[in-house]
Amino acid sequence: MVRYTCDPLRRKLVPHTAIVLHLLSLLGASHLRHCRQHHPRHHLQLLPPYQNHRHPNILLIEDNIVNQKLGIRLLQKLSHRCDVAENGKVALDMLKANEDRYSLILMDCQMPIMNGFECTRQIRSLESSGVRQGRLPIIALTANVSSESREECQKAGADFFLPKPLLLQDLKDTLNQFVAPGA
């Protein structure tokens, strides 16, 4: 009997073993060798590390459900993986727990609890203090397209600015500018 698990990104059932194989790939080769030794009838393969997938994982930080759904759908159309945080505090917790998971952040500026400006400043502070390695590209998202809003995004540490609602071609062009193919 084959067990199935729901894959929310593809909205279909996938064999349970595919999920197990992916989890094993995240655990690493030593765990895989142990499983092969103790369960020889299962032909397990090590999947490539998550960061080496053809399309990078993006963190979408957005409080509005409609904008979340739009962002997710556009990223899916561009074959990108996406996680969602509903505010800056949740996003910081996700970044600290998964330091190497994300290649880029799409950050709404106006959110409750912690807005995008403060979250961006805190991410840049973690990077400058050495707690977080490298510089993570942050694309500010806002419905306010004034030059003052653009300047405020830059002062906070955002790398680029996109107006909302997001348009597919604008998002594609921006992602191509900041994320290397195959990252």
Image (cartoon, rainbow, N blue to C red):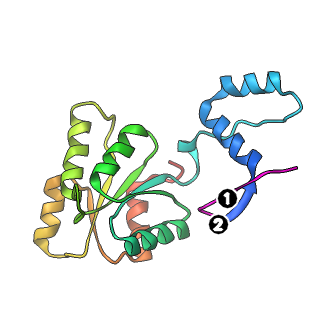
Answer with the quarter of the image where residue 61 lies.
bottom left
Which mark is on residue 31? Answer: none
Q: Is residue 6 magenta?
A: yes
Residue designated by label 1: 6
102 over 140 or under it: above or below? above
Q: Is residue 26 magenta?
A: no
- Disc 2 marks which amino acid? Arg
In the image, taking residue 75 as reference, residue 114 lies left or right, namely: left
Q: Residue at x 58, y 48 (%)?
A: 53
**What secondary structure is marked by label 2?**
loop
Answer with the quarter of the image where residue 112 lies.
bottom left
- Percent position (x, y) of residue 181? 51, 54
Q: Residue at x 66, y 42 (%)?
A: 22
Residue designated by label 2: 11
Q: Nearer the viewer, residue 173 or 45?
A: 45
- Percent position (x, y) of residue 132? 31, 35
Crowd rating for badge 2 (residues with CA inside 10 Å; few <14, some 14–19, many 20+): few
Disc 2/disc 1 C-alpha distance (Å): 7 Å
- Percent position (x, y) of residue 11? 64, 66
**What secondary structure is marked by label 1?**
strand
- Disc 1 marks which amino acid? Cys
Q: Earlier in the sequence, mark 2 or mark 1?
A: 1
49 over 176 or under it: above or below? above
Q: Would you say residue 99 is visible in this rendering?
A: no
Which segment is the magenta one? 1-11
Q: Does the magenta stretch mainly form a helix, a strand or a loop?
A: loop
- Percent position (x, y) of residue 31? 68, 25
In the image, taking residue 35 as reference, residue 155 lies left or right, namely: left
Do tag 2 and tag 1 residues touch (Cβ < 8 Å)? Answer: yes
